[in-house]
Amino acid sequence: MAPMTDTHHEGTKTTKATKYGLDEVTESLATEVVDSIFKVYRALGPGLLESAYEACLLHDLKRRGLKVESQKALPLVFEGLRVEAAYRVDVIVEGRIILELKAVDSIHPIHEAQLLTYLRLSGIRLGFLVNFNAPTFKDALKRKIF
């Protein structure tokens, strides 16, 4: 699959991956992940528990041959103190992308802040905030880069 490109005012082309500082493997993986999220969003519709969406999404990602970890507890280090299981990430795909899943009426700034904190603490650069109860897929998906 060819990477997405943007043309700068100088007329030179760069890939989307280069523009955002992500490698092309991560961008290609992101496309696969978004396809999977869309498939689950479209098939199930709103109104289920977050855990149901997570189970179906994990199933589809694994069928695509991707390595996924769910409900992964991660540590943090603060001033030399290591706190085990300080936070729990809903889904990590191939060690490169965090998925924070919701099934809520609307996404609030705290949800976006939560994902950005997870990205910063984990060292993973790309994440998606997904609300399976959103009225449209455009409203359901937010991409964040740290």
Image (cartoon, helix red, strand yellow):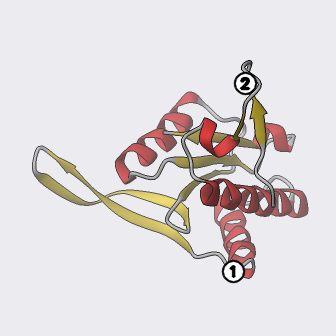
Amino acid type at image mark 2: His
Residue at mark 1 to residue at mark 2: CA–CA distance? 35 Å
- Numbered tag placed on residue 75 in the rendering: none
Secondary element under disc 2, as helix, strand or loop, is loop
Q: Which residue is mark 1?
A: 65
Q: Nearer the viewer, residue 135 or 92?
A: 92
Residue closer to the observer: 94 or 103: 94
Q: Quadrant of residue 61?
A: bottom right
Mark 2 burial class by Cα count in 10 Å: few <14, some 14-19, many 20+: few
Residue 99 locus on image (x, y percent): 59, 55
Residue lying at 56% horizontally and 47% vertically, measured from the top left: 22
Dot 1 or dot 2: first in sequence order is 2
Q: Is residue 55 left or right of residue 96?
A: right
What residue did someone put label 2 on?
8
Numbered label tally: 2
Which corner quadrant of the image does residue 9 belong to?
A: top right
